Image (cartoon, grey):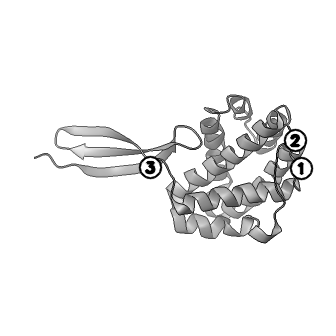
Amino acid sequence: MTEYVVLMESVAPRSPYTPITMGILWRPGGCSLDLRASPMTTNHSAAHREAIRRTLAHHARGAGNPGTIAHATLTTWRPVAARLAPIIGTGGVDVLFKRSLHLTSVAYPWFAVAAEGWDDAALLASLEACLVDREDKNAVEAAQALLVTFYELLESMLGESLTRRLLGPVWTPESATPCLESTQ
């Protein structure tokens, strides 16, 4: 019987809502890559998705037009980046954000253009332009998908508990949220 030892395991989304678990397994005679489908549908997963939706809605003040959604996305993003920069560095935050844009671009191909920005200001301006150019419902879904993807990538690195403690204060409490609806 051959024994396998997990050398590394991480989560990488195939699309914003269907990540796969990847691991490198060692066995006598070599390594192999192990890919397993692993949808993240835990109660915690639903909780942070709802917290992100609620926070975007709060920053959009219930409006569903793309300009407002773009502004709400950036307004939500800035405190996330500010809380994480002292922990993983500005470069770490930028790399995770660009990776999130890249992964989200599977479902929203127009995000690929935004991911090409090199500095933080250009990247955020490009992201804002991408969201403004979309229909209301598409902008809302894409913004949520981007932030959820970022959260889940961070969680795969830091763990559920630390990620929740770091970003929990950023999310809007349930009692303070207007409804975010598209105006279509």
Q: Nearer the viewer, mark 2 or mark 3?
A: 2
Rendered residue at 70%/64% (across/down): 83
Q: Position of residue 82 (x, y in %)?
A: 74, 60
Q: Residue furthest front?
A: 184
Q: CA distance from mark 1 to mark 3?
A: 37 Å
Residues 152 and 114: in front is: 152
Q: Position of residue 95 (x, y in %)?
A: 62, 45
Residue hosting label 2: 183
Q: Position of residue 14 (x, y in %)?
A: 52, 37
**Location of residue 51 (image quadrant):** bottom right
**Residue 173 visible in this rendered orientation of the protein:** no
Q: CA distance from mark 2 to mark 3?
A: 38 Å
Q: Is residue 131 left or right of residue 100?
A: right
Q: Secondary structure at mark 1?
A: loop
Q: Three-letter amino acid code at disc 2? A: Thr
Q: Is residue 21 left or right of residue 43?
A: left
Q: Nearer the viewer, mark 1 or mark 3?
A: 1
Q: Secondary structure at mark 2?
A: loop
Which of the two labelled residues, at mark 2 and mark 1, occupies the earlier sequence position?
Answer: 1
Which of the two labelled residues, at mark 1 and mark 3, occupies the earlier sequence position?
Answer: 3
Residue hosting label 1: 63
Q: Which mark is residue 10?
A: 3
**Residue 138 position (above or below residue 181):** above
Q: Is residue 52 left or right of residue 184?
A: left
Say whether marks 2 and 1 touch (CB < 8 Å). yes
Which of the two labelled residues, at mark 2 and mark 3, occupies the earlier sequence position?
Answer: 3
Residues 159 and 93: in front is: 159
Residues 153 and 173: in front is: 173
Label 1: few (<14), some (14–19) or many (≥20) C-alpha neighbours in 10 Å: many
**Residue 102 visible in this rendered orientation of the protein:** yes
Q: Is residue 9 left or right of residue 84?
A: left
Question: Number of numbered discs present?
Answer: 3
